[in-house]
Image (spheres, grey):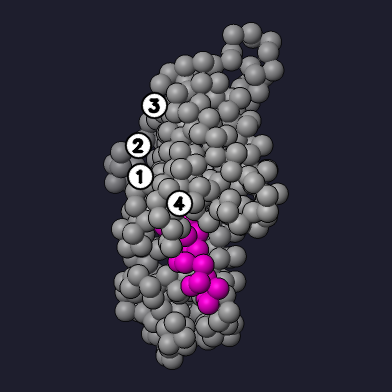
Amino acid sequence: MRECLGRPGAESIAVSRIIWTVALMMLATAGSALAHDTWVITHEQEALAHAIPPPAIFTTLGIANVAIALIALIGVVGWIGIGRTDIPDRIAARLNLPRVDAARLEPWVPVALRLGLAAMFVTAAFGLHPRLGYAVGESPVLFASDLEFRHLPGDWTWLVWVQVALGAAFLLGVWTRVASILLAVLVLLGCWLFTVDMLAYAGVLIGTAYYLLVKGGGRFELLADPDSLVRRVASVPPGRPQAVLRILTGLSFLYLGILYKFLHPTYLLAGVEFYGLPLFGFPAEVFVFIVATVEVVVGILITAGVMVRPLSFVLVFAFAFFSISMNEGVLGHSFLYGIVFALFASGAGRWSGNAAPATTYQPSPSV
């Protein structure tokens, strides 16, 4: 690993080469954001990577990192600035681009989120998507592969059955709003048990819990009494649940890009070396620096509501790329596919391509 981390020549990368390949890198690297780099390496590899100092590109200013940062800054400022004008609308009209009927997609978002949560809970409870180094079913976890019960003081394995119950509730649509409250409580408990590691997932999970609390869905909705608290919770301004979910998802990308890529780049470097990921002709440390930058850019754009629908396609491609390249399996991102569908269905900003804003509440299909 030291040879990989210390490869010379990182600062001699041509600026033009970086410019022409950042777009391709964005497609191929964004998927590692909401999947921990520690998922796909063993505890021994993680300890070794943690002990190695980060490469110079992460600690010293040079041609490569300054060029990448400037490209990212120009891109973010440019997209946000253009999004505040009518240029996107004029481009869409000139090219006769198809518009997305968000009002038709929106009712299916709770269904996608519920199914994603159900798959995540069942997978976590029975250890069906273990961290590298464990057999399937050997190590049950809370939410994700790196939140292992076996490393906690005391016996917390009873949370396995809590996850099974919540998974069944979300799958069947039984009292979805009650289940969403319990989901939020479980996230807070996870933050207490796993501290910083849980924060990687807390944002998207809390955003999902709030969305389902407002939107409900399933066969047993608690909306019979017009004056009930549940009815008042559901009567929030249109677009608020979507905005909360989108912003918390974007902030999660930012958090992971900064904490697990910029501050601990050797984790991904270990994975790059172990799996032999395609580096697009870059030295490994430059590749990881671009990954970190892309994740931060994606987080900023999603949080700001810019390019949300195009980014949802990018994320689907990226999740599939990393699932195949790192042998994660399709279950590795089951919950995140629901999040991506929510981003695509809701959109945001002038680049959303909405046919018309949805102004009335539509209940989700009772499935």
- For label 3, the residue is 104
Dot 1 lies on which element? helix
> Marks 3 and 2, how far apart in space?
12 Å
Mark 3 or 1: in front is 3
Do tag 1 and tag 2 residues touch (Cβ < 8 Å)? yes
Mark 1 or 2: in front is 2
- For label 1, the residue is 92
Quarter of the image with the C terminus is top left
- For label 4, the residue is 138
- Residue 113 visible in image: no
Dot 2 lies on which element? loop
First in sequence, mark 3 or 4: give its number: 3
Q: Is 57 situated left or right of 367 in this image? A: right
Total label count?
4
**Magenta segment:** 31-49
Do tag 2 and tag 4 residues touch (Cβ < 8 Å)? no
Circle on res. 99: 2
Dot 4 lies on which element? loop
The x, y position of residue 54, in whole percent, is 55, 80
> Marks 3 and 1, how far apart in space?
20 Å
Front-most of 110 and 131?
131
> Marks 2 and 4, how far apart in space?
47 Å
